[in-house]
Amino acid sequence: MRITGTTRIFYCIADPVDQVRAPEVFNEVFRRHEVDAVMVPLRVTAGHLAATLRCLLASPTVGGVSLSIPHKAAAAATVDRCSRAALAANAVNAIRRNPDGELEGDLFDGVGFIRSMDRAGLAYAGRRILMLGAGGAASAVATALAAAGVAELALFDPDHSKAQHLAAVLRRDFHIQARDVSTNDPHDYDVVINASPLGLKDSDPLPVDVDAIRADAVVCDILMKNQPTPLLRAARSRGLIAEPGFDMLIQQTPLYLEFFGYPELAKSVRSDDGYLLDLITPDALRRRSDTAARPLITDIPA
């Protein structure tokens, strides 16, 4: 990749930052289409987030910022205005500076998750769902599921106040059955989603007792690092349907590209994103279809 004085710079900000996959995806899109742009990972601590965002986005060279753990909720408080989806979840994962100088935020995690479930053929409407975690990504996924008509959302987070607040917002804004729960016991649920950081470190405990998950339930883990995660491996060892989360990033990519001012790139990715799935799908999760040149990521080996 050739970087010059005219190159448009995007940042992917997180803490830690080694788990992010967005720079790989965006740089491959830019390279493939010969766009003079680059995305750079940047580790920023929580205490420096607001100042860093305003400083970076003050530069006309910077096209925008993508945000990951743990900054999505804090970034929502930093922007001057944001989309309805971001307001509902109180989180943003994309920021740009508008011509009037305002910082505008949006949130694509929820839409990305829903579309990844649709591509995998996994049902969620009318289902009872246990969400593990209540942070920025969890809030985005929960609000998207609520809008899609799930029967119930149960939210578990060690920080009880976060789960309690999110459940109240879901009830108020979407009029669905949403509640914070005091246990991560999964036996009553059709879909179990790990939207917590558990699994980023090899030493992390499983976020849920896999043996207690119903045999007909679906497990999803939205983590980008260490896929297949210990949770997915344990679920597959029981014969459960277990879905990794990285297709959620692929499904968001056209939305990011539109937001950052590349509508033609977004259209191209929508028409063919198989090369991006190939890029970030681990060999352990890969199986080629004879008819579709992309991984079938529901077929995870135990």
Image (cartoon, rainbow, N blue to C red):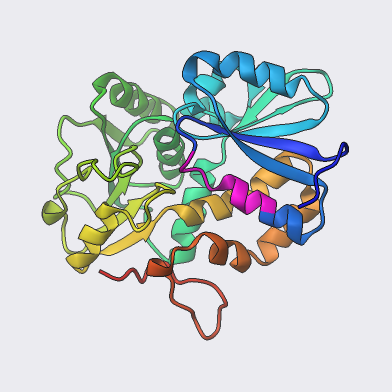
Residue 219 in picture, x, y percent from top left: 29, 55
Residue 189 in picture, x, y percent from top left: 21, 50
Q: Depth check: 164 or 206 in front?
A: 206
Name the residue at 14% across, 48% down.
Answer: 209
> Which range is magenta?
18-27
Q: Is residue 185 visible?
A: yes
Residue 221 in picture, x, y percent from top left: 35, 50
Q: Is residue 34 rendered to the left or right of residue 79?
A: right
The secondary structure that most of the magenta stretch takes on is helix
Image quarter hosting the C terminus = bottom left
Q: Residue furthest bottom?
A: 290
Q: Number of labelled discs?
A: 0
Q: Residue furthest left?
A: 212
Q: Is residue 155 rendered to the left or right of residue 87?
A: left
Q: Depth check: 130 or 285 in front?
A: 285
Residue 238 in picture, x, y percent from top left: 17, 65
Name the residue at 56% across, 19% down.
Answer: 49
Q: Is residue 90 visible?
A: no
Q: Residue furthest right?
A: 6
Name the residue at 80% across, 50% down.
Answer: 2
Q: Depth check: 185 or 36 in front?
A: 36
Asked if residue 24 is among those painted magenta in the image, a careful observer would answer: yes
For residue 257, above or below residue 72 = below
